Image (cartoon, grey):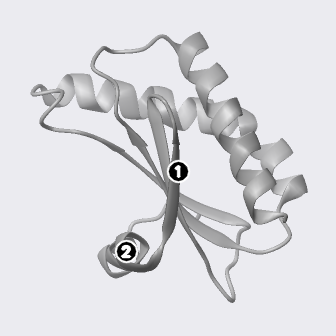
Amino acid sequence: MERLKSKKIIEQLFTSGEGFSVFPLRLVYLEVPVAKTPMQCAFSVSKRQFKKATDRNKIKRLLRESYRRQKPALYNKLQKPYHGMILFNGKKIPTQEQLDKNMEQLLKKWVKRVSL
């Protein structure tokens, strides 16, 4: 339920959504009127940067785990539901610790933006 899978919604995210970066992560988000969860999220890694599917999948697993750790704090701070996509723009496979730190910065910055 919390994963964003709809091609239509993902397309809408990139056409009318807003975005910002905290290197090496980028968040593209869109406020939605009604949703079952506070945030539906998808994760993406560039095929141009990482040719091997195993590398892309590993980074996506690390991203999902990092997001899962930050989720409870994020859900407490969100007033409205959102759709979002987190993209990895780095050139090297990160460690879990690096991603946790970057994800925390990204989500804190995003909460500040949407709560204004």
Above or below for 67 versus 58: below
Residue 15 percent location from the top left of the image: 35, 77
Which image quadrant: the N terminus?
Answer: bottom right
Residue 82 percent location from the top left of the image: 64, 70
Secondary structure at numbered mark 1: strand
Residue under label 1 = 20
Q: Is residue 57 left or right of residue 19?
A: left
In terms of image quadrants, where is residue 114?
bottom right
The Cα–Cα distance between marks 1 and 2, rounded to whole angstroms, is: 22 Å
Residue 115 percent location from the top left of the image: 84, 63
Secondary structure at numbered mark 2: loop
Q: What number is the disc on residue 6?
A: 2
Residue located 73% across and 67% down the image: 38
Above or below for 29 versus 103: below
Residue located 90% across and 54% down the image: 76
Residue located 69% across and 51% down the image: 110
Disc on the earlier residue, 1 or 2: 2
Residues at circles 1 and 2 in contact by the CB criterion of under 8 Å: no
Residue located 37% across and 27% down the image: 59
The amino acid sitting under disc 1 is: Phe
The amino acid sitting under disc 2 is: Ser
Could you classify mark 2 by the number of other residues whose Cα lies within 10 Å: few (under 14), some (14-19), or many (20 or more)?
A: few
Q: Is residue 28 left or right of residue 76?
A: left
